[in-house]
Amino acid sequence: MREIGVGLLGLGNVGAGVVRLLADNEKAIEARLGAKLVIKAAAVRDVDRERRVDVDPAILTTDVDGISARDDIEIVCELIGGVTKARDLVLGAIAKRKQIVTANKALLAVHGDEIYAAAERAGVDIYYEAAVCGGIPIIRTLREGLASDRIESIAGIVNGTSNFIVTAMAKGGREFSEVLAEAQEQGYAEADPTLDIGGGDAAHKLAILAMLSFDCRVDLDKIYVEGIESLEAIDYQMAKDFGFVIKPLALGRRYPEGIDLRVHPTMIPASWLLADVPDTKNALYVNSYALGASMYYGAGAGMMPTAMSVVSDLIEVARNICAGVTGSKPMRSQQSLESREILPIEKVETRYYLRFSVEDRPGVLGQLTTVLGAHGISISELLQRGERGPNAQVSVIAFTHKTQEGRLRAALSAIDSTALTSAPTMTIRLAS
Ligand code: NDP
Ligand code: HSE
């Protein structure tokens, strides 16, 4: 049986899962592929570190740059994360005409144009199913399943760690830091967890999803990003009281004048399917011209679900190698991508939840509503919460009707620049 050599760059959470899955499903994979995938080397920083899987010590090496020079390796599987070293390694491997599999969304969101173009020029494959939504085969779905359709909008929970945190916080009784530590322990969080909680990881994934959904190049810096760090227990409670659930959403929508791309905590009706996506689960809701609404759900992070996507990519690339067609069907032909404007956040129109921190004294509500009204912002619900504590500080909660974000920002800046509020007003966008 033909052997196809694989070189792993990285043997952390995902790398260990790849080794385990290739061993556990060895026979089935061989039968489906008609060839044998063999890990010839695994590059790590520290060969003595304890691994989550048993590996033959002979395959471990710290010579990460040497992997793509090896003749017995046909596929280089990048699982080290980060953007700088990973870019050099992937471009180096492409130059040596190795096929590439990666789970690295940050790499593709930042250096994707350069990497896809290099792969296209060299005629090699680059597969990245695990980079978005871990184990959900969403890249294949967008690229192949919906290839004949026109996607109008996407809305997804694409970061498992932040969904895990908001799910736990909505139940109450746990500290943010404790829940984050659990996600890190389970291997869901990024090496730098601020990417998870700050929305950066979701933005990386949205950049990839938007390229595939809207056929455009995406400048990562133009995606509006807000994390989940400033949400407080009262916000989860208020969401519940008004029939909503707070979820960390990545949103994309096609408009004639450009593409709206944003990542932020969003209040969604409790009756929506996305509201029922718990813990580290991910889901992507797609609205397309011919199919209409469709949703894709599953494990968005973790050792084995992510490894499943990586190994499926290895199988697909190996099939291409066996058929002699590598590089002949790029994920997205770079020449066909359009440059579309990404709409500034000020142009977004939606409903808002506002939480004002104010003193409980006569006239406060009147002053708040006067400023909002002067900016053309209409309130749909208004209430006050909280015991009169020291200095009589309370929360005033307002839900607005649909309004333009630029207008809302001007109103809040006018309010927060006075002594009326004791802290910046909390704003959460509602799904619209
Ligand atoms: P880990 O931090 O667990 O593993 C990284 C591995 O890379 C380690 O084995 C580390 O070596 C090795 N490494 C890092 N830098 C170097 C270097 N310069 N030279 C040699 N080896 C190096 O990361 P994960 O496995 O969690 O993630 C890997 C990739 O997969 C990332 O891009 C991540 O975003 C992505 N991903 C992760 C998911 C998850 O659930 N964890 C889900 C989807 C994608 P050593 O062990 O010696 O330190
Ligand atoms: N840190 C990421 C998450 C891993 O929590 O979703 C999956 O990409």
Image (spheres, rainbow, N blue to C red):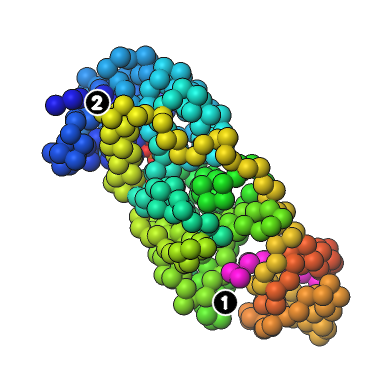
Q: Residue at x 58, y 35 (%)?
A: 335
Q: Quadrant of the N terminus?
A: top left
Location of mark 2 (residue): 4
Report the disc number at residue 44. none
Q: Name the front one of labels 2 and 1.
A: 2
Q: Residue at x 44, y 47 (%)?
A: 143
Location of mark 1 (residue): 238
Res. 252 visible in picture: yes
Question: How far apart are the alpha carbons under marks 2 and 1?
Answer: 56 Å
Residue 15 locus on image (x, y percent): 32, 35
Depicted 225 relative to depicted 353: above or below: above
Residue 286 locus on image (x, y percent): 48, 61
- Residue situated in front as seen by the camera: 3 or 64: 3
Depicted 352 relative to depicted 332: above or below: below
Magenta stretch contains residue 421: yes
Depicted 308 relative to depicted 178: above or below: above
Q: Which residues are magenta?
A: 420-432
Residue 84 locus on image (x, y percent): 53, 27
Which corner quadrant of the figure contains ligand 1? Answer: top left
